[in-house]
Image (cartoon, helix red, strand yellow):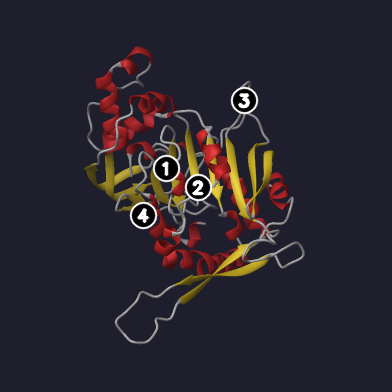
Amino acid sequence: MKLLTANFLVCAVKSCKGSPAAFPLHLRDVELELQDVDFQPEFIRNIIPRVDWDGLNQMANELNFTNIPQTKPEGETLRNEQVLRDLHRLLLETQVTEGKLICGNCGHEYTIKEGIPNFLLPSHLV
Amino acid sequence: MASGNREEEYEEKNVHDVYQQIASHFSSTRYKPWPIVERFLQSQSPGTVGLDVGCGNGKYLSVNKSVYIVASDRSGNLARIAQQHQPHSTIVADILNLPHPHSFFDFAISIAVVHHLSTPYRRIEAIQEILRTLRPASGENPGGKALIYVWALEQKSSRRGWDKGDAQDVMVPWVLKAPKSSASAEPQPQVFHRYYHLYESGELERDIEKAGGRVLESGYEKDNWWAIAGREDRK
């Protein structure tokens, strides 16, 4: 699971979706891996405006990544190739291969296996 | 929700379990993108974010690499096959409980998925769940759009041969050839049956409206009904 994807995920439980505590999901017991993805500067430049920066920062903190810009890069900063390459690495190449995603609202744990998080709910939560 | 549980169990056995078992053979037969789906995906602007709900083997994830798609499938085996398509991403999720925020996504596709839900209520709920994730229109900005495909009842010239007036709730066989073994006996093919609701003319549009959607465009293509829909509500 890419960190970019985690930015577009909330708890699958219906009553959690509107809750601010359900986003971002919390990462626990993770194994990370770097995976090569073709670098497309234009893609990164276009996708950044769609990223919830606070959510990304919170997740990055939980992973002890310390060099994330505190505020969302925009304008000229997004012309800087090194900035784009760093964001590319963070958002697309950093893969969570194993671990858990935990909802801060209901506490439900979703398992990530072989890079794929599983959001199927047990019947009592449907 | 006793009846909901029963329907879930029914779909578990007659849809989900079957796809888990036929995943790799199914995938090897699904490689050609349908033209209308291809056109829809190619028309999305660079940097937009979308969903592929019920992505199967992910054959639509190779169409446009300048957008970002979070693809989901109920079958872990299919999700694993779909995972290879960069730069996109794959998760396991149920169409009735998508793990995505409200009112966010620029586009969504759900191709040959909604017809696997076994009651009218669940099919409408599935469409509602997709529409929930789309950006509503606001001011000058058009909202997010979803492209939905379902199998048509009217397909007289297909090898199945169904047509208007036939039963709409059917079990469709999938024949899985057994691998050739050294044993002398001819290997027996395994037959799986999947549940389908065959949509009749106008039914998809009606379901979308009942789900709170607005049909923007719709039509028939090669044994399927399709529609592009947005949300009726505005921000």
Q: Do labels 1 and 2 share a chain?
A: yes
Say which chain tag 4 marks.
Answer: B
- Label 1 vs label 4, nearer the camera: 1
| Residue of label 1 | B62
Q: Are marks 1 and 4 on the same chain?
A: yes
Query: What distance separates the C-alpha of mark 1 from that of mark 2?
Result: 9 Å
Say which chain tag 2 marks.
Answer: B
SS under mark 1: helix
SS under mark 2: loop
- Label 3 vs label 2, nearer the camera: 2
**Amino acid type of the residue tagged 2 in the rendering:** Pro
In the depicted view, which residue is nearer to us: B189 or B119?
Answer: B189
Work out which residue is located at the far top of the displayed protein and give it. A76
In the depicted view, which residue is nearer to us: B74 or A18?
Answer: B74
| Residue of label 2 | B33
Query: What distance separates the C-alpha of mark 3 from that of mark 2?
Result: 32 Å
Horizontal relation, residue B26 to residue B113: left or right: left
Horizontal relation, residue B110 to residue A64: left or right: right
Query: Percent from the top left, x then y, of residue B47?
Result: 44, 29
- Label 4 vs label 3, nearer the camera: 4
**Amino acid type of the residue tagged 1 in the rendering:** Ser
Residue shown at 55%/35% (left/top)?
B103
Query: What distance separates the C-alpha of mark 3 from that of mark 1?
Result: 30 Å
| Residue of label 3 | B138
In the depicted view, which residue is nearer to us: A12 or B140?
Answer: B140
Discs 1, 2 touching: Cβ within 8 Å: yes
Discs 4, 3 touching: Cβ within 8 Å: no
Query: Percent from the top left, x then y, of residue A115?
Result: 31, 49
